Image (cartoon, rainbow, N blue to C red):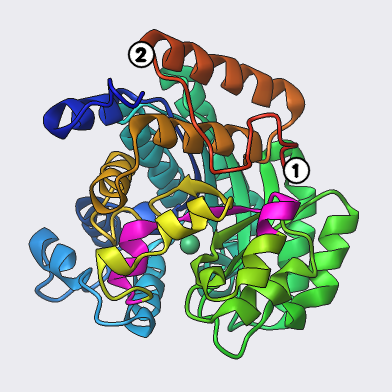
Amino acid sequence: MSTAEPLGTDRDEMIQRLPKVETHVHLEGSVRPGTLLRIARRHGLDLGRLDEARITDLFRFRSFRHFTELYEQCCAALREPADLQLLAEELAEAAHRQNVRHLEVTFSPGTHWRGRGIPFDEQLDAVRRGAEQAWRRIGVSMRFVVDHVRGESVEECQQIAEWAVAGGPAGVVGLGLGGFEPGRPASLFAEPIRWAAARGVPFVPHAGEAVGPEGVWDCLTFHPPRIAHGIRAVEDPALMKVLRNRGVVLDVCLTSNLRTGVVSTPQAHPLRRLWEAGVRITLNTDDPSMFHTDLVAEHRLAARWHGFTVAELAGMTMTAVEAALLPDSARMRLREGVRADLDELGIVPTYPPGVTRSVAAAG
Ligand SMILES: [Zn+2]
């Protein structure tokens, strides 16, 4: 692609047309301000003088802590299973407009159970219905990761691990770990994580975001196929080597990292350094509404900030295809569809140094 690499608006157009796969996006963080307002009004919640513009404005974080607080407030407006189904359907529709073929969506069942008393099977039923609608109507496939919030107890984590295992037939493919990282390492939750892994549910934590390399090292004990963020691994060359050698994939979220202050400037983001070190990377939105982004925008930022070519971005899509937690038959279907689209666009994916597509997929 070196001589044919499109630039400017041509590149932006090509990025729009690229087939995409997203492996790290939160259902709750995808709620549009207008939808949040409608849901809250339907439930008779007093939002004071908040309107759509003011909610949008609220989503301008001052810190990681501020972000997690606002996130909790948004979750509090979600009161019934139908709200979750609506979010899943809207997320898939937005993905479809960006040529996203597959979504691995994280949601936090403990929050909806603890706060609003929505039983897990009703939550799962709702998101599964949303996923079925999306597949039938627009051909976007979805799977789910259930996330434990690190500030909550080990007992709750065990409950979520059990839900993750029970939810397999309805599309739950992983056990996540999110929330405020400092002081709450994955090893605190070793027992539930191992319990789920022994029953075939892999661990896909957040790490290396608000905490440095030690948070990523801690998670590696549990053999995660992918880590959300993980970007502070760049501070430790030995850790980058382990990530590369084990083929652990980092689900990187550029705008999220900038907005929560994990990096101070776009140029300071280690995306290119991770790539050059041979670490396998996917691009993701994390919480698209709250961060005012989408997957097309994240791809364009990677190109603008760090000079990623369309071929390299396509390599990240193929990495996401291989690293998505999917049964073989579904992965094969996804791979064939993405490959056909890339062929049609005349794009040959390229990979980080030392990585080839034939590297065994984690998970
Ligand atoms: Zn996340």
Q: Quadrant of residue 342?
A: top left
Residue 257 lies in the magenta-colored region: yes
Residue for point 74% across, 83% down: 188
Residue kind at label 1, given as amino acid type: Gly
For the N terminus, the image quarter is top left
Disc 2 C-beta below 8 A from ligand 1: no
Percent of width and height locating residue 298? 31, 47
Tell me if residue 130 can be seen: no
Residue 354 lies in the magenta-colored region: no
Residue for point 17% across, 66% down: 55
Q: On residue 168, which mark appears?
A: 1
Please give left or right for residue 65 compared with residue 358 in the image.
left
Helix, strand or loop for disc 1: helix
Q: Which residues are magenta?
A: 243-261
Disc 1 C-beta below 8 A from ligand 1: no
User: For mark 2, what is the residue?
Assistant: 345
Percent of width and height locating residue 117? 57, 68
For the C terminus, the image quarter is top right
**Disc 2: CA contacts within 10 A as few (<14), some (14-19) or many (>=20):** few
| Measured Cα–Cα span from mark 2 to mark 1 | 35 Å
Q: Counting residues from the N terminus, which is met first, the one under dot 2 or under dot 1?
A: 1
Q: Is residue 53 above or below residue 27?
A: below
Tell me if residue 73 can be seen: yes
Foreground disc of the pair 2, 1: 2
Residue for point 45% across, 52% down: 27
Residue kind at label 2, given as amino acid type: Leu
Percent of width and height locating residue 339? 52, 17
**In the rendered structure, are the residues bearing label 2 and label 1 in contact, judged by CB atoms less than 8 Å apart?**
no
Residue for point 60% across, 77% down: 213
Q: Between residues 122 and 55, which one lies in front from this camera angle?
A: 55
Helix, strand or loop for disc 2: helix
Q: Quadrant of residue 332?
A: top right
